[in-house]
Image (cartoon, rainbow, N blue to C red):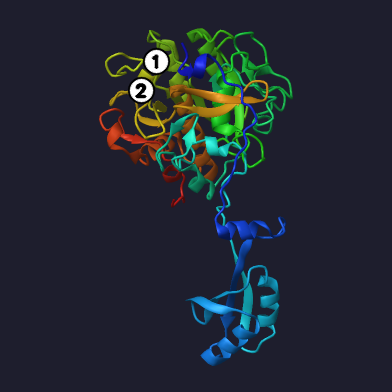
Amino acid sequence: MLTDHRIRGGFVAAAAVACTFVMTPMHAAAAKQNANSPAYVADHVLVGYSKVTTAAQRHAVERRVGAHEIGSYGVGGRLLQVRAGTVRSAIAGLESAPGVRYAEPDFVEEPSAVTNDPSFPLQWSLRNTGQVVNGVKGKPGADVHATAAWDVTTGSHSIVIAEVDSGIDYTHPDLAANIWTNPGGVGGCPAGTHGYNTVAGNCDPMDDFGHGTHVAGIMGAVGNNRRGITGIEWRASLMPVKFINAKGSGTDFRLLKALDWVIAAKDAGVNVRVVNDSGTWVNTGYSQAVRDELSMLAAHDILFVTAAGNSRSNNDTTPRYPCSYGAPNEICVAATNQRDRLAGFSNYGVKTVDLAAPGDNVYSTLPGGTYGYMKGTSMASPMVAATAALVLAQQDMSTSALKSDILNNVDPLTTLAGEVATGGRLDTCKAVPGCAG
């Protein structure tokens, strides 16, 4: 079986989700202003006085416009309170008064990188405020700190992630803009195609199982488009290479052909830097051919990210492939839940599993323009793969440096000590150069 568990017996198609936001009084007042203008506090004015302005002169000016001081800042700066709705008229009165250097609204500084996608509150893995998602209450901060990373970068179409899976519904409205398109001739496929299908032996990697589309949304659903969800990379470039069939099974040979196609694309000039392979099955045997193929990826400067498995077993003692190959360019990922604990289904291994990432109760894209919940280390692996692409969008580095950057910047958790090699959960912000969140 694949590394996902289908919640409630099947894929859950998303019904319309109504999101209600509770505003503080400050935000409620600001929201009444022109939506095309920057929001500001409805009863605050910032004013800067010249150095020679006396306190008596300040107070006289403020009385004329119906304001009083409630705070100070810098040299000569004052925060004034005015009657709600009179900010602009108060500013006009202040600007005409002697001794006033400037007067301006107290603009509301909302986090610029918090996406406007309506189902973002369901994506606890990206921002966990302790909200209830699908009936489960989370723990504040038990997330990958994506919003802080987005203040630095939201990704780049120039970094290509090859998704080796069941394909992707590349027509999904929340994915289409972030699907790689063949310029013509790459891998023997014509212009306008989007990858490859090793099951059918053609250039159409349309998803007929659903797993790959869910994985794709985690990595690269279009961000800030007022639709559905967002991926860790708002501006991803996802290349689907299908090796899993409509029943959810694959073979080593089809995987090898998929990875061959990725390497051929890299040789043709496509900037493939990351492969995500969430497919893993119980009792899969060691394959020298697959291990050699991972070495080929390494020689092409491509990071290989994969899932630890969902049999609740120790990969150190019961190897799970491809996780247990332990290639130098490989990262193997366990799954955590909304409380920052190892998910009950997740495999582990302090020698073979590198880190954990959110993988339980994950809301993402599904075929046919829908959305739903799935869980598994299949959902954790793409969070790491997309973080790798986000890092590269900010700063180019070798595959070995990229792997070290991710593994050396986890959030250490007591709940993961002795479970995974780093003892930590993915921290996207820490991994992205320049992110101080």
Q: Residue 6 location in percent, x, y? A: 50, 17
Q: Position of residue 64 (x, y in %)?
A: 65, 85
For the residue carrying disc 2, how many other residues have a C-alpha within 10 Å: few (<14), some (14-19), or many (20+)?
A: some
Q: Nearer the viewer, residue 327 or 365?
A: 365
Q: Vertical placement of 430 versus 4: above or below?
A: below
Q: Is residue 250 above or below residue 31?
A: above
Between marks 2 and 1 in the image, the one whose residue lies nearer the viewer: 2
Reading the image, the residue beneath label 1 is 321
Residue ID at (57%, 80%)? 48
Residue 110 lies in quadrant: bottom right
**Secondary structure of residue under mark 1:** loop
Report the side of 279 relative to 226 (left or right): left
Q: CA distance from mark 2 to mark 1?
A: 20 Å
Q: Residue 187 shows which numbered tag?
A: none
Q: Determine whether, in the image, residue 87 is placed left or right of residue 57.
A: right
Inspect this view and state whether residue 161 appears.
Answer: no
Disc 2: which residue:
344
Q: Residue 383: horizontal and vertical position, in percent?
A: 48, 32
Q: Nearer the viewer, residue 254 or 429?
A: 429
Q: 10 Å neighbourhood of mark 1: few (<14), some, or many (≥20)?
A: many
Give the image quarter of residue 283: top left
Q: Residue at x 38, y 37 (%)?
A: 404
Pick the residue in front: 300 or 39: 39
Give the residue type that dot 2 points to: Gly
* On screen, residue 270 above or below 247: below
| Rendered location of residue 284, percent (x, y) | 40, 9
Q: Amino acid at mark 1?
A: Tyr
Q: Is residue 360 left or right of residue 68?
A: left
